[in-house]
Image (cartoon, rainbow, N blue to C red):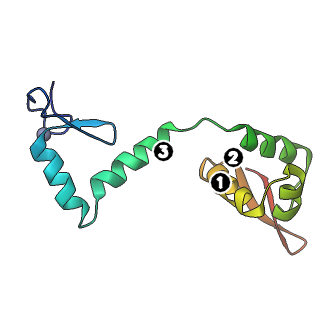
Amino acid sequence: MRCDLCGCPIKNKEETKYRGQILCEDCYMDILSSAKICDPWATYIAKSALDQEVTITELQEEILKILTTLDGVEATILAEKLNIKLSDLHQEIATLRHMEKIRIKIKDGNRVICLW
Ligand SMILES: [Zn+2]
């Protein structure tokens, strides 16, 4: 077994699992100490994990389905149609915007959600 970070061999039971990576003790300690300062490695791992996660949930699919039939809809109306809380919807919208599936535009002075 080798350390994912520095590639050095790791003795049995000395490997440390950290966010899906297998690390030697030295690297793990390095990460722990640098994490306290700014945590660029953790950010990197978190970001790559996010990039892999491109699967769309049922709810997000439902949102996209509704949006294909409407030319821009207000968040409150969309939440009503989906029968979910507005705060929950905002979370889904943020994810879908990040995936560049939907965008926000101004229609008749209102912020509406529409397909990208
Ligand atoms: Zn290492």
Side (left or right) of 34 relative to 70: left
CA–CA distance in space, label 1 to label 2: 6 Å
Above/below status of 76 relative to 46: below
> What element does badge 1 sit on?
helix
Tell me the amino acid under the disc marked 1.
Answer: Arg
Tell me the amino acid under the disc marked 3.
Answer: Leu
- Quadrant where ligand 1 appears: top left
Looking at the rendered image, the quarter that the N terminus falls into is top left
Q: Is residue 60 visible?
A: yes
Residue under numbered circle 2: 101
Mark 2: few/some/many CA within 10 Å (<14, 14-19, 20+): some
> Which disc number belongs to residue 97?
1
CA–CA distance in space, label 3 to label 2: 16 Å
Report which quarter residue 66 is drawn in: top right
Q: Earlier in the sequence, mark 3 or mark 2?
A: 3
Mark 3: few/some/many CA within 10 Å (<14, 14-19, 20+): few
> What element does badge 2 sit on?
loop
Tell me the amino acid under the disc marked 2.
Answer: Lys
Residue 79 location, x and y as percent? 83, 57
Residue occupying image coordinates x 48% and y 45%: 50
Q: Are marks 1 and 2 in contact (CB under 8 Å)?
A: yes
Residue occupying image coordinates x 68% and y 52%: 92
